[in-house]
Amino acid sequence: MADTGPVRRTVIFLHGLGTTSRMWHEHAKLLPDFDCLLPDLPGHGTACHRPWVSLAETARDVATLIEATPEGRAHVVGLSLGGAVAFELLNTRPDLVDGVLIDGASAVSWRLAPLLVVAAALISPLIHSRPFMRLVAQALSIKAARRPEFYGEFRLVDGGSFRRSVRHALAARLRNTEFPGPALLVAGQHDIGSTRVSNATLARLLPSASAWYAPGTWHAWAGTNPDLHRAMVAAFLRDEALPDGLRHEESRPRPSMTDDKLARRP
């Protein structure tokens, strides 16, 4: 029997709210040595016919995709909403995860989160208006040439999925702080809410985690500095030194952000 060589490693990319797996296409091009899975999350893109229900249900969907791979394991890369799904996957099926990179997602409470939940509920009937989609495109650093395509994708997200995914992403918590695999927790320097506090907390609690941030950037720095973001993802997956341009997160969690509070569901 011919030797087919080593089984290629798998990485699954989980996109953010309002976007689709298309956001990862350029990342995947830099990873010819990996099998890259690029699913659309429920309520988005090609999965828009399936409404967003919960982090738990989406994590089960992701687990099913990973179980179907040759090794039945994968690295997971999640951004924002996708990062919240990655947290839930670590809670429920850590046995499927070789390593995880989470960008722009928080696992601790944020005092302004309830206001964002209310705002999402109020604005949801208007999410397909051109002014709102333009604001979202600007926030996600969608370049002008791709905005018509982005608007078409965003119109596929229904109001209910939008409201629920915002609420669930803000309520994400990591209950499994014993995940032994490599974990890279990243954020823009001026990311929203408690993201950097969360990253610093988890870097202290998880056995093989580290926290970094991209200086001078905001939540959607994958769009404003795509070359650095892609290089970071590739370096992490290949277990190489992270590229210059990132800074190690030296901050300490606020005193109120205790280990117990991290694990508690809101």
Image (tube, helix red, strand yellow):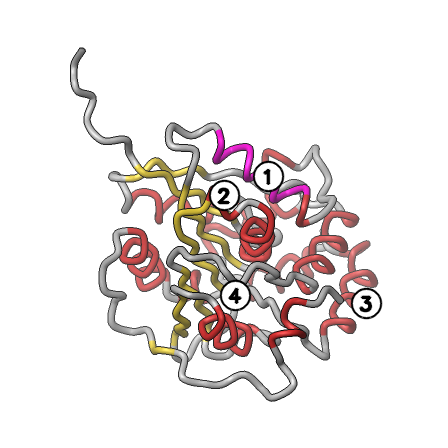
Quarter holding residue 262: bottom right
Kind of residue sitting beneath label 3: Val
Residue, far bottom: 255
Q: Distance between the residues labelled 2 and 4?
A: 17 Å
Crowding at dot 3, Cα within 10 Å, few <14 / some 14-19 / many 20+, comes out as: some
The amino acid beneath tag 1 is Gly
The CA span between labels 1 and 4 is: 21 Å
Which amino acid type is marked by label 2?
Ser
Contact between marks 2 and 4 (CB within 8 A): the answer is no
Q: Is residue 244 magenta?
A: no
Ranked by sequence position, the earlier of labels 2 and 3 is 2
Labelled disc at residue 45: 1
Within 10 Å of disc 1 (Cα), the crowding (few <14, some 14-19, many 20+) is: many
Mark 4, residue position: 104
Q: Which sits in the foreground, 73 or 112?
A: 73
Q: Quickly name the residue at label 2.
A: 21
Along the horizontal axis of the image, is 12 left or right of 4? right
- Tell which circle, 2 or 1, labels the residue nearer the N-terminal end: 2
Is mark 4 in CB contact (under 8 Å) with mark 3?
no
Q: Main secondary structure of the magenta part?
A: helix
Q: Are marks 1 and 4 in contact (CB under 8 Å)?
A: no
Cα distance, mark 4 to mark 3? 21 Å
Of pointers 1 and 4, the one earlier in the residue sequence: 1
Element type where label 1 sits in the image: helix
- Looking at the rendered structure, the secondary structure element under dot 2 is helix
Nearer to me, 104 or 55: 55
